[in-house]
């Protein structure tokens, strides 16, 4: 009997220590669990990801960023040493497939998921929750502007669903405007906190965040003209004016900078993609691959634009040489590469949104009568800000002289028969190699600039008006994506605000 | 009757507990005859009343008489015959029919769970034993390869033919969609990682027991739902004897992809003039198809003109430039075997010595030592293995001790990847121009890329052979100790511990490459533009991986055996504790690549570090605990009816506290009808018949996996591109606790940046459940000369733990949840004919096995989603999928658009086929039909043995073919270099109407790009179907001829007792469908993973091995 008692005791002790052993092994020593992080630990990373998605970074995957728009908007052409293949071939033939857009789609959604985390896990009165709400709205807008209807109301809530349904694009737009409004309310009430250090765009400056939010809101409103709900667009613009915080102004580029330096993985993402290897003057693969576009070179030359030397390098004979987008295997010996106004340094901040763009949009709103002001002055400020960003000496004077001295209808807005066209052409120039996607949106909205069909494309194939839903949606969210009834020909179906 | 039986069973169980007694009966004389199965009397057989000293001996006519009581048992024995037990009933006459010893199916014992040996006749589930002789008859180096095609239902699949290939071992097909389907490996009762199998000395093995289904394996717990390969190593017996064996082997490439030898290089370069070495002037290369001035003979893509072109003729072309800036030339004509001859015949040498001695009463010792070294088919690739083992067992009163320890050290040294595009040797070899004779350019001082080498993209593979090496040293220790104490005659307590440890050190380097200034200025003979992807100087690159993992295992259990008149009860009850841990350290000096690295932000958590010099390292560690209790009860009735059940409860640390405990039962029953049914018992035809049926449930958490610590491979984003990657076992630990990732570039100074994991986990993740039913029979005919075993099984693996791929719009891409079901059934047939015939000294045996396996995905229902497929293997031209209602696994491929009858639809103007937007089902990738046939012929001292292996019912995608056609190097793409009409194509004339295309040829879609490149490199290249073929094959896996020297030749000396000489061939021949012009369809890019069904250029070509072996038995 004693033996049995002893046995039971041994078993009991063993069972207790066994349980303890199982419990001590519940944390992964190989990384940091999310439970230990605050919003501020995630925000800076999400902002850097925004910069990387916009400007490149992943050399091997052109579809991760807006490379396609940069090429279609005639900012880049490619060298002729290689036959195009893969995504480059799809871009050049306007033959995008469902495999084209996976990276773009996935990265944007995961980033929204991270901004959600910041909103839910930050000091309530810090600037970060409001800022994240603005950023999230901007990312959703980017997705709608590329795909039309997208998962929105059910998106990025894996504990609720891993197969979110799609929402109507126009409805999403309206919801995003509301989101920005509540973000502005949140931002207005925010105070300076230790979290400001993680704000690598505006350093916790809520005034700038509100200006940025208003500018994004203005951009969304303008998307709806001239093809969408004009009345609604007008009311959105009125609400911006009523809010009173204003837009990004002179010198107020929205710049993301966590502290880029010329080291591996820490370079400015555009530099890392299109510039030079860390600490060297060795060009990256994409710096070798992409050269000046002859269409753009010809335009800049025809308008005597002094920025040409900032957008592109001079070639070995002191001029500028490029190639047409998608042109075949003809070779020009003297080529121009990306200029010093764009590739400023490995440590340059990443440009998310320029003051120039802000002015050009204001100019458009005023010209269309949706806002009061002087559109010519706003246009002029836009060109001045572009000159300033590129590092042109005496930017204001140079820009003013460039406009005033030009007889081109694409430059001199005062003499232009179509001031709107002039605004769009100069906006397109100001966005050269900096924001191909915004230029592509304007192109789909208003048709400027008028661009010739690339030589590679199957004759008669126009430039796509959207991207196709990615292949991963077909394999992993089949029922919902099928409900959108997408055809390959939907590549040429306009986004609801397009023409 | 059944009720009565149950009642008796119950009563007797009570009896066993001491409630009831045993009745005695009266003794009388029983007479009978002892014969063999043919009825021939056996003289002088011994007849003994079991458990007594009462003995009788049969007379010269086999007749006997003995005094015995009803209910007692007669044991009949005779030399060379199996003993037979006869239960005495009321009859006064009893005849005994003895079967030859070697064929006695009743007496076969097998190793079952926990290493307990049982009579096979008692078991209600399928097991198969392979003895050391059968395993080693082809002198294998890797134990697993010696099992291929020998047992039904066992699928041994080799990932490639490298010096140290990965082997996938699965029993009865696949059950888990994303988790492991590989069998558990148990050595001397201790579970070990699969890697031990490759490094175990096959001669140390006494036998290998295959417990195919979870019924057999239920006692091993959750790791055993995929079946168990239980290996028992040898024990010391008899007086001291030594065995020495030496084997010399020769390995060579057996099948090489069919390459084209007609066309020279060109990949679409712009026009230009190039040096003409024949005249000293310049020439313009002209594309013969377009007439354009643009072709150059130095590309990796071989789309240039034919070597015999009339328009274009050269005697020689420069291949490079040496350090003295002198051009080196090669003749401008194809050298058909110039590439294949790069590979060598790899010589191997294996020396083994083993010894054994012992005494049945005291114990024994077995020891062995081994040194194996072999060369690969790639020059300078080597493999070596040194190992030793000591096993001992000791009987001391009521104690019995046994234990063993083995240690081996395996070293491999192989060529790494090329230094700037990270390609393997094999791919660089295939991509040399057809005019390059690789053997003639071994001197890399003259023919390296930095000497203006002719090929713009692919370095001379000799550069990798000499300047890029990947090494790996694996040391493995296995030890086990078991102590048994016999408390009383029916109760034994056993404690057993096992410990194994693996340490791996895998350094790799790629030497620096510097371009001399003269080359940077001139670019060599072909000009600077030849260096199309001129990478600049690349510094010395190195990486080092060190890892180790430990596995400790303790079992304590009791075994109780009680017998009554009719019943035998065997009870096993005990518990198990297992702890596994692993640690890996990856270290690199590469600054532009490798995993994302950060800084030690939170010391106790974050272990990836960037050092000041740009080097980086990452440390991974995993730990897992498992505990269990189990019970197992067998009840035998009159030695012919057996009922068996088991129960086990597991606790695992890898699940959350609320879900970590789970239990599962198994039950099975078998009946040896030939012992019971009189008409069978007395039959001259049927000598043995057993039927059985069983059910088992096994719990499992199929999250175990490996962290690939890649060497040199991470640069290209892939892994294991020729160098070693070390697979660090993670045991599934921490799977339910996703961790954050560090944002790229972070930290910036003190600024932290983390991103949430792209994986999420269902709350309350449950263990999955495999339910298995099996039934079968074993039939011996004609004195067991014919032995047939048939099994049927049906397994359902439900509620699997699967990381479902989510919509990326969920913010994540993977959601670990309980979902999915695979229903897996099949039939296994084993047939042995011994002897098939016998004429004088000539004797022939044959054994054959057949298996049909069918794994079907029933559903992929998740908690939140009903998915219509899971992609678990990424393939360039499609993917490997689990699709509900279809076979597991499905190959889904890119394809052309086709009309309803399958004709390819082409464009009416360009003649070009268009791409189908959806992936198409191309068939399943796991073999469904297996046939193994092993004939043996013996004549005096000679024996000839062969193993044929057929597998069918599967498809394979050869991405290698696709890659080759991109480069224009295969014989397939040597066709249709000019404009051609797509064969059997149709043109759509109106919606739904198609007419045959007879007159619209394919023309290049790219202006200026000739048809050949456009079609092969840019167009067909995107389609998977042309590269997908039947994966069926027949292989002559083993062919061995052994001569056993007659004893008299050895004379009267007492040292060498036996001598054997063997000539052995492995993988001598393979027959494939004609459409498979690429490689061995058994290979898999995915190694031991589930996503079999495609090969790439990263597997070296198949090889054959011929070896000669001498074995001497000493003392």
Image (cartoon, rainbow, N blue to C red):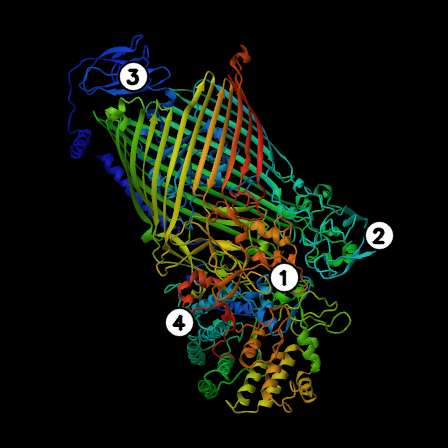
On-image quarter of the N terminus of chain B:
top left
Give the letter of the chain under mark 3. Answer: B
Question: Which residue is disc 2 drawn over?
Answer: B279
Question: Which residue is disc 1 drawn over?
Answer: B1003
Q: Nearer the viewer, mark 3 or mark 2?
A: 2
Q: Counting other residues with Cα less than 10 Å from the Cα at mark 4, is it few (<14), some (14-19), or many (20 or more)?
A: few
CA separation, marks 4 and 1?
48 Å
Q: Is residue B530 visible?
A: yes
Q: Is residue B139 visible?
A: no
Judged from the image, the secondary structure of the residue bearing numbered disc 3 is: strand
Q: Position of residue A209 (x, y in %)?
A: 50, 78
**Between discs 3 and 1, the one toward the N terminus:** 3
**Between discs 3 and 2, the one toward the N terminus:** 3
Question: Which residue is disc 4 drawn over?
Answer: A153
Judged from the image, the secondary structure of the residue bearing numbered disc 4 is: loop
Give the answer, above or below, for where B401 lies relative to A132: above
Question: Which residue is disc 3 drawn over?
Answer: B76
CA separation, marks 3 and 2?
97 Å
When asked about the image quadrant of residue B5, the answer is top left
The residue at the far right in this view is B280
Q: Residue, x 46% and y 75% (percent of image)?
A: A137
CA separation, marks 4 and 2?
74 Å
Dot 4 and dot 1 within a common chain:
no
Q: Counting other residues with Cα less than 10 Å from the Cα at mark 3, is it few (<14), some (14-19), or many (20 or more)?
A: many
Q: Counting other residues with Cα less than 10 Å from the Cα at mark 2, is it few (<14), some (14-19), or many (20 or more)?
A: few
Q: Nearer the viewer, mark 4 or mark 2?
A: 2
Give the letter of the chain under mark 1. Answer: B
């Amino acid at each position: 009997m004693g033996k049995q008692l002893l046995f039971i005791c041994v078993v009991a002790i063993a069972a207790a220590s066994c349980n303890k052993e199982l419990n001590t092994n519940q944390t992964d020593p190989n990384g940091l669990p999310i439970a230990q992080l605050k919003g501020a630990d995630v925000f800076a990373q999400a902002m850097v990801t925004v910069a990387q998605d916009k400007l490149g970074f992943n050399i091997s995957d052109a579809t991760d960023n807006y490379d396609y728009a940069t090429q279609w908007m005639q900012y880049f052409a490619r060298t002729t040493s290689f036959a195009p293949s893969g995504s480059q071939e799809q871009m050049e033939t306007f033959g995008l497939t469902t495999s084209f857009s996976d990276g773009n789609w996935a990265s944007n959604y995961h980033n929204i998921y991270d901004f959600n985390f910041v909103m839910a896990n930050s000091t309530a009165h810090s600037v970060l929750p409001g800022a994240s709400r603005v950023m999230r709205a901007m990312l959703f807008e980017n997705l709608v502007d590329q795909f039309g209807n997208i998962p929105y109301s059910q998106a990025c809530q894996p504990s609720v669903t891993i197969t979110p349904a799609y929402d109507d694009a126009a409805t999403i737009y309206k919801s995003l405007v509301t989101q920005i409004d509540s973000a502005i309310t949140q931002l207005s009430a925010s105070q300076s906190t230790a979290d400001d250090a993680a704000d690598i765009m505006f350093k916790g400056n809520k005034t700038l965040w509100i200006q940025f939010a208003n500018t994004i809101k203005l951009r969304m409103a303008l998307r709806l003209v001239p093809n969408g709900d004009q009345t609604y667009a007008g009311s959105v613009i009125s609400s911006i004016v009523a809010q009173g915080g204003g837009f990004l102004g002179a010198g107020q580029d929205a710049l993301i900078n966590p502290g880029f330096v010329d080291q591996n993985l820490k370079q400015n993402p555009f530099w890392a993609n299109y510039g030079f290897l860390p600490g060297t003057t060795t060009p990256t693969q994409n710096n070798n691959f992409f050269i000046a576009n002859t269409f753009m070179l010809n335009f800049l030359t025809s308008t005597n634009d002094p920025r040409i030397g900032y957008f592109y390098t001079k070639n070995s004979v002191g001029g500028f040489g490029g190639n047409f987008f998608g042109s075949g295997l003809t070779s020009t010996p003297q080529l121009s590469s990306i200029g010093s106004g764009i590739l400023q340094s490995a440590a340059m901040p990443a440009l998310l949104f320029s003051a120039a763009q802000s002015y050009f949009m204001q100019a458009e709103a005023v010209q269309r009568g949706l806002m009061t002001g002087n559109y010519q002055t706003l246009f002029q400020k836009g060109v001045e800000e572009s000159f300033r960003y590129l590092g042109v000496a005496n930017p204001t004077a140079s820009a003013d002289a460039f406009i005033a001295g030009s007889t081109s209808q694409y430059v001199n807005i005062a003499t232009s028969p179509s001031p709107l066209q002039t605004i769009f052409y100069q906006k397109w120039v100001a966005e050269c190699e900096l924001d191909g996607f915004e230029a592509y949106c304007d192109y789909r909205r208003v048709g400027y600039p008028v661009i010739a069909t690339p030589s590679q494309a199957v004759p008669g194939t126009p430039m796509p008006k959207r991207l196709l839903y990615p292949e991963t949606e077909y394999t992993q969210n089949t029922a919902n994506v099928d409900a959108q009834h997408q055809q390959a020909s939907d590549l040429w179906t306009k986004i609801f605000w397009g023409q | 009757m059944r009720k009565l039986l149950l009642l008796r069973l119950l009563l007797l169980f009570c009896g066993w507990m001491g409630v009831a007694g045993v009745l005695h009966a009266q003794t009388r004389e029983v007479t009978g005859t002892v014969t063999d199965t043919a009825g021939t009397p056996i003289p002088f057989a011994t007849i003994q009343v079991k458990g007594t000293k009462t003995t009788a001996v049969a007379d010269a006519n086999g007749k006997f008489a003995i005094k015995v009581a009803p209910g007692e048992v007669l044991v009949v024995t005779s030399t060379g015959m199996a003993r037979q037990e006869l239960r005495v009933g009321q009859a006064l006459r009893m005849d005994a029919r003895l079967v030859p010893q070697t064929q006695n199916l009743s007496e076969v014992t097998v190793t079952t769970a926990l290493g307990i040996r049982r009579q096979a006749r008692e078991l209600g589930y399928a097991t198969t034993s392979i003895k050391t002789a059968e395993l080693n008859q082809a002198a294998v180096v890797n134990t697993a390869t010696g099992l291929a095609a020998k047992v039904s239902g066992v699928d041994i699949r080799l990932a490639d033919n490298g010096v140290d290939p990965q082997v996938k071992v699965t029993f009865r097909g696949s059950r888990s969609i994303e988790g492991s389907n590989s069998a558990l490996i148990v050595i001397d009762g201790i579970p070990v990682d699969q890697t031990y199998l490759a490094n175990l000395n096959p001669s140390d093995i006494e036998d290998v027991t295959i417990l195919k289904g979870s019924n057999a394996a239920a006692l091993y717990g959750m790791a055993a739902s995929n079946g168990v390969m239980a290996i028992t190593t040898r024990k010391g017996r008899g007086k001291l004897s030594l065995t020495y064996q030496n084997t010399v082997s020769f390995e060579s490439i057996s099948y090489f992809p069919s390459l084209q030898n007609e066309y020279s290089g060109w990949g679409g370069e712009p026009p230009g003039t190039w040096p003409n070495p024949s005249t000293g002037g310049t020439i313009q290369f002209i594309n013969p198809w377009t007439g354009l001035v643009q072709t150059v003979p130095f590309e990796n893509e071989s789309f240039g003109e034919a070597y015999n072109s009339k328009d274009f003729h050269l005697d020689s072309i420069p291949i490079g430039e040496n350090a003295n800036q002198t051009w080196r030339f090669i003749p401008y004509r194809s050298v058909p075997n110039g590439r294949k001859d790069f590979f060598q015949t790899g010589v191997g040498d294996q020396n083994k010595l083993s010894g054994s001695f012992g005494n049945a009463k005291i114990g024994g010792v077995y020891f062995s030592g081994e040194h194996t070294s072999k060369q690969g088919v790639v020059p300078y690739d080597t493999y070596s293995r040194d190992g030793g083992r000591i096993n001992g067992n000791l009987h001391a009163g009521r104690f019995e001790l046994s234990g063993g320890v083995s240690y081996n050290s395996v070293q491999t040294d192989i060529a790494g990847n090329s230094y700037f595009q990270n390609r393997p040797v094999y791919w660089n070899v295939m991509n040399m121009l057809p005019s390059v004779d690789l053997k003639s350019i071994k001197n890399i001082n003259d023919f390296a890329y930095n000497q203006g080498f002719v090929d713009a993209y692919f370095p001379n593979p000799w550069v990798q052979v000499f300047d890029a090496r990947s090494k790996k040293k694996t040391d493995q220790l296995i030890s086990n100790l078991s102590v048994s104490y016999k408390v009383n005659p029916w109760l034994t307590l056993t404690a057993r511990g096992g410990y194994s440890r693996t340490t791996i050190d895998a350094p790799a380097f790629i030497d620096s490459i510097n371009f001399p200034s003269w080359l940077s200025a001139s670019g060599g003979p072909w000009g600077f533009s030849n260096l199309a992807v001129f990478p600049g100087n690349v510094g010395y690159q190195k990486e080092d991986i060190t890892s180790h993992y430990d596995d400790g295992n303790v079992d304590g259990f009791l075994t109780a055996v009680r017998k009554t008149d009719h019943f035998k009860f065997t009870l096993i009850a005990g518990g198990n504790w297992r702890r596994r841990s692993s640690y890996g350290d990856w270290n690199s000096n590469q600054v532009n690549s490798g995993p994302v690295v950060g800084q030690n932000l939170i010391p106790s958590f974050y272990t990836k570090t960037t050092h000041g010099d740009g080097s980086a390292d990452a440390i991974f560690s995993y730990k897992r605990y498992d505990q269990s209790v189990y019970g197992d009860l067998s009840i035998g009735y009159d030695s012919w009816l057996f009922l068996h059940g088991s129960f086990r409860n597991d606790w695992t640390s890898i699940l959350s506290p609320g879900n970590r405990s789970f239990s599962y039962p198994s039950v099975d029953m078998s009946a040896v009808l030939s012992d019971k049914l009189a008409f069978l018992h007395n039959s001259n035809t049927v000598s043995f018949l057993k039927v059985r049926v069983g059910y088992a449930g096994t719990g499992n958490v199929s999250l175990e996996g490996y962290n690939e610590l890649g060497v040199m491979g991470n640069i290209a984003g892939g892994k294991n591109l020729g160098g070693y990657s070390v697979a660090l076992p993670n045991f599934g630990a921490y799977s339910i606790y996703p961790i954050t990732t560090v944002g790229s570039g972070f930290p910036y100074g003190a600024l932290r940046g983390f991103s949430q994991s792209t994986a999420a986990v269902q709350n309350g993740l449950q263990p999955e459940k495999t339910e298995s039913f099996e039934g079968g029979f074993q039939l011996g005919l004609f004195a067991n000369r014919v032995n047939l075993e048939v099994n049927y099984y049906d397994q359902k693996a439900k509620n699997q733990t699967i990381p479902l791929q989510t919509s990326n719009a969920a913010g994540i891409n993977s959601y670990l949840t309980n979902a999915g079901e695979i229903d897996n059934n099949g039939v296994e047939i084993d047939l042995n004919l011994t002897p098939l015939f016998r004429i004088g000294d000539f004797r022939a045996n044959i054994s054959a096995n057949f298996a049909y396996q069918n794994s079907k995905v029933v559903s992929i229902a998740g908690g939140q989603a009903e998915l219509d497929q899971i992609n678990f293997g990424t393939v360039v031209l499609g993917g490997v999928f689990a699709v509900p209602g279809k076979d597991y696994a499905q190959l889904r491929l890119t394809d052309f658009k086709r009309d309803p009858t399958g004709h390819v639809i082409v464009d009416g103007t360009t003649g070009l086929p268009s791409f189908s937007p959806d992936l198409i089902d191309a068939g399943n990738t796991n073999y469904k039909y297996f046939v193994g046939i092993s004939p043996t012929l013996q004549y005096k001292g000679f024996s000839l043995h062969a193993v044929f292996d057929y597998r069918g019912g599967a498809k394979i995608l050869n991405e290698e073919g696709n890659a080759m056609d991109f480069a224009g190097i295969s014989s397939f793409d040597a066709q249709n270099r000019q404009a051609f009409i797509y064969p059997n194509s149709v043109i759509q004339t109106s919606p739904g109407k198609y007419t045959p295309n007879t007159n619209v040829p394919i023309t290049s879609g790219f202006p200026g790009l000739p048809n050949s490149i456009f079609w092969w490199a840019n167009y067909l290249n995107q389609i998977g179907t042309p590269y997908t073929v039947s994966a069926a094959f027949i292989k002559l896996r083993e062919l061995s001829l052994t001569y056993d020297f007659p004893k008299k030749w050895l004379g009267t000396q007492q040292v060498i007792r036996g001598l054997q000489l063997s000539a052995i061939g492995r993988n001598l021949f393979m027959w494939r469908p004609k459409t498979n012009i690429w490689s061995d369809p058994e290979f898999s890019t995915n190694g031991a993973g589930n996503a079999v069904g495609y090969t790439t250029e990263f597997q070296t070509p198949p090889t054959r091995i011929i070896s000669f072996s001498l074995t001497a038995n000493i003392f």
